[in-house]
Each structure stands twice: as structure tokens, then as C-alpha cells.
Amino acid sequence: MINGTFMPLTLLKRCKTLTSVTQLHTHILKAGLDSDSFIAGNLILHCATLISDALHYAHSLLLHSPHPDAFMYNTVIRGFSDSDHPYSSFTTFIDMRRNSNNLQPDSFSFAFSLKAAANLRSYDIGIQLHSQAILHGLHNHLYVGTTLVSMYAECGWISHARNVFDEIPQPNIVAWNALITACIRCSDVKGAESLYKRMPVRDLHSSNIMLSGYMKSGEVHLAHNLFANMPTKDDVSYSTMITGFSHNGHFHEAFNLFQQSHRLGLPPNEVTLTGILSVSTQSGEFQFAQILHCYLQKSGFVSRSIINNTLMDTYFKSGNTTMARSLFQKMPGKKNLVSWTTMVAGTAMQGHGQEAMELFHQMVDSGIKPDSIAFISILYACSHAGLLDHGCKYFSMMTNDYKIEPSYEHYGCMVDLYGRAGELEKAYDFITKMPIEANDVIWRTLLGACWIHGDVELGEEVKKRLLEVDPNDSGDCVLLSNMYASVGKWKDVLGVRKLMKDEKLVKTPGWSIIEQ
DNA sequence: CTAGGGTTAG
């Protein structure tokens, strides 16, 4: 109470937790203000966008509201679109049409629902929403059109994205930026570049989008040039460059830029810190990672789950398993998919296959749906611990239960799994039955297994297949000569070595013993 | 309200 008057909206602004909002809601009910749509709408907005883990409460406020309006529905649709369950946006959209007295969806309803479709990469739902938007005459609306562009691009339909853009009567800079992003999502950096050069006005967003596009397609030099010529840069420009360098293995450049931004007095944000921590880990700079950890503790960034996840990985890779586990156990808030995957992968790296499997099941039991990367981690765990049957079980679980399409990485793990177990024929059989054509990495994995088990006959067959997919391959020479060496076929070893272009490899120490 | 940067696997 302020001066004896109950001011719910003033009090609402101070609510930082769900508990405080529910207390306020009780007072609102007592004061008989729950039928006030403005108050109810703000209550829902606060829970759906400002307080974490309060979305469910926002939804129940909507369901219990005596006179729900479009704003309330739209706010809940918006909240779900960015949540772990974007699908609920659509059920809410349908509820809006079904339950209420002829409430019409507006541009907000479509923009938020389309965002959910984009996050789910659901072309089927996206195209239904597009049709509905046409029926309501909103498909050319600037905001709806912009979100349609993103939705089609996320679903891989760049031509649809372009068509929608062309129909927007007066596209603004945001719409242009959405189209550039669309090209990049569909791996058309050149297309993005020509739009970037052609657009009437550019802003910092536009340049940052191009920086990320160049980095994602490995054009580090082009990104660097653009960055150097940008008149203004913000923290996103820096974090884009740092994570871009990180993904392309340019660790030195990443450190330099981090230092430079520090000297300029730019305070590092969560993304920059995540990136530089990952760079420290990848380059083995564990002492620097240690310093970063101290800084993260002092600045409070450690409580962020993404930082915590990255730190866990750092400690696993530096060999400090105890610290990694402790970070996982003491992690504030809910452990997400990446937290669990990092634990599975880290444990697998130490060779503890059984424990990795236990973690994987704990993850599933806690209600988290494993993704493609989680399955790579558990398959890796099985292959490195020699758990052939379990690996096969996970592979079928992935394809049958979770409907995840296996990638080269998954197939590679399976070939490795059969190979290490000495089931070379089964590995070969598995490769021939794959729905996609085996690449060089897959054949090289099997060639490695042939070497370990000394199967020269199959090894030679595999070598033929490898040259079919990569005629210029020379990377297999090492494996091949190792294979011959393992069975004492020194003449063949020499034959292969002579074919090798890299002389340094020929003159490795101890080589002269064989030559004699 | 719509557009930009993110950790884990390989």
C-alpha cells in the first residue's frame, strides 16, 4: 500500500520473482480488480516476459481471466514462442479463435506465432499461418512480412522468403536485415553480400549480420576487412568476431581482439566471455581460463548457465574432472540440454562409458529431450568404451524414437564402434547400407580400424573406395602404411611412403630401420 | 511487436 491506496501496477514493477507476483495477485483478487483487463494484461506481460519460469503462471492467468482480450493472448503466444515449448504458441492461437467472443488475430498474433514456427523450423505450421494471415489481410503487414521472411528462411525456403519480402510495400531497414539474415541461414553469403551492398540504408545490425555471415562461411578475411572498415562497432560486433575467430580456429586473433576491446574500455558481455573461454580451452590456455573463472565469479557471470556450461567443458578438457562435476552439481537454476551433453561428452572423454550412459538416462528422466549432438556424445562414449550393443541401441533410439536424422558424425561413430570392436565386415556392411554416400572421413575411420586389426585385404578395398570419393586423398597414406607395417609388409609400407607428397612424413625418426 | 552475437559433438 502506498499512501493508503492500492497501486497494483506500481507494485508489479517491483516484482522480481514469481512468488512476489502471486502475492500481488492475491491482493488484486481481494480488491476485486481481477476483472480489470488492463491490470490482468500487465500481470500476464510481466510473468511471460520479465520473470523467468513464470510463463506457466501467465498462461493460467489467461485461462482464468473473465474477459481475455487480444493483448493477453498475444502476450502468452509471444512468451511460448521463445520458450522450450514453442508449440504451445499455436494451441494458444487456436484457443484465441475458439474460446473468445469473436476475437480476431492481429499483426501481433501473427508475428509471435510465426516466430514460434521459425524457432520450431516447422514449414507446415508456418505455411498455415501464412494462409491465415492472407485471409485476415495481414500478410503484407511490415512486421508480419518480416517474420514470414525469417520463418521461411529457418525452414530452408529462401525463395519463399524473397517472395514475401518483395510483397512488403515499404520494407524498412529491419525487413532488409531479415532478408540478409535469411540468405545467410540458407548458406548464400554472396546473395547476402549483394543485398547488403544494394540496400538503401545500412545500420550496425546490417554490418554485424554480414560479419557473422562471413565467419560462418569461413571467410575470415572478408569479416576482418569489414570489421576494420566499420565506422562504429558495438559489443555484438566484437563478440561476433571473437566467436567467429574461435569457430575458424584463429585463436591468436580472438585473444588479440579480446585484449583490444578491453583496452578500449568495452566491458565484455556474456557472449564475448563464453567465446574467449572456449578459445582458451581449445588452445589449451588453461591458466588464462583460470583467471577468467575468477573474473566470472567476481562479476557474477558464473550464475549464467551458458557460462557455467562452458566452464565445465574447460575443466573436463584440462583434466580437472572433480571441478567440472562440482560445477555441474552446484549449478544454479535448471540444468539444460547443453549442461547434460557437456557432462556426457566429458565423462566419455575420460573413457567412462558406463557413467556416460547413466548421465544420459538421468538427463532423459529429468524431462530433457536429447538432440543430435547429445546422441553424438553418447555414441562417442560407447565407441570409446567398446560398448557395441549399447551403441547400436542408442542409434536405433535416435532414429526410431526421436526421429533424428543421422548425420555423418553419427555414422562415423557407428563405423568407429564396429571397427574398434573388430567387427570390420559389419562396419563395411553398415556403410554400404547408409542412406547417404559415405564421405572420406567415414572411409578413413574404417581404414584406421583395418590397420588396428591388421586386415590388409579389407583395408585395400576400403582404400579403393576412399579414392573414389576423394581422388586427391593423401591423408590415408599414413593409415595405409601403418596397416601394412602392423602385419610386417615392409615393401608395401615403402611403396605407400614413396607416394606421399609430404617428405617430412617420410623422414620421421626410426624410418631408416625399415628402409634397410 | 519484426532483424544481429552464444556454450556442448565432430
Image (cartoon, coloured by chain):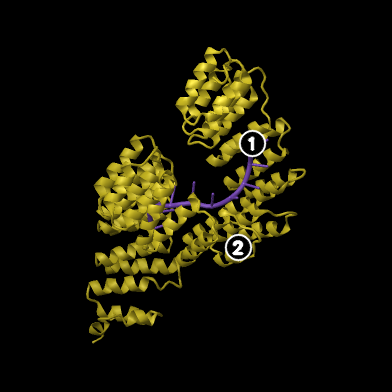
Q: Secondary structure at mark 1?
A: helix
Q: Secondary structure at mark 2?
A: helix
Give coordinates of residue A460: x percent, y percent: 33, 69
The tint chain B carries is purple
Give coordinates of residue A389: x percent, y percent: 27, 47
A356 or A291: which is nearer to us?
A291
A80 or A58: which is nearer to us?
A58
Whether residue A378 is visible here, answered yes or no, is no
A316 or A14: which is nearer to us?
A14
The 10 Å Cα crowd at callout 1, few under 14, some 14 to 19, many 20 or more, is many
Tell me: residue A443, above or below residue A296: below
Q: Chain of mark 2?
A: A
Question: In the rendered view, does A457 fall on the left or right side of A129?
Answer: left
Quarter location, residue A453: bottom left
Quarter location, residue A220: bottom right
Mark 2 sits on what residue?
A: A227
Q: Chain of mark 1?
A: A
Give coordinates of residue A234: x percent, y percent: 59, 55
- State the quadrant of the C terminus of chain A: bottom left
Nearer the viewer's eye, disc 2 or disc 1? 2
Mark carried by residue A111: 1
Question: In the rendered view, does A166 fall on the left or right side of A393?
Answer: right
Give coordinates of residue A305: x percent, y percent: 42, 44
Q: Earlier in the sequence, mark 2 or mark 1?
A: 1
The 10 Å Cα crowd at callout 2, few under 14, some 14 to 19, many 20 or more, is some
User: What amino acid is found at the position of numbered circle 1 in the picture?
Assistant: Ala
User: What amino acid is found at the position of numbered circle 2 in the picture?
Assistant: Phe
The chain in yellow: A
- State the quadrant of the N terminus of chain A: top right
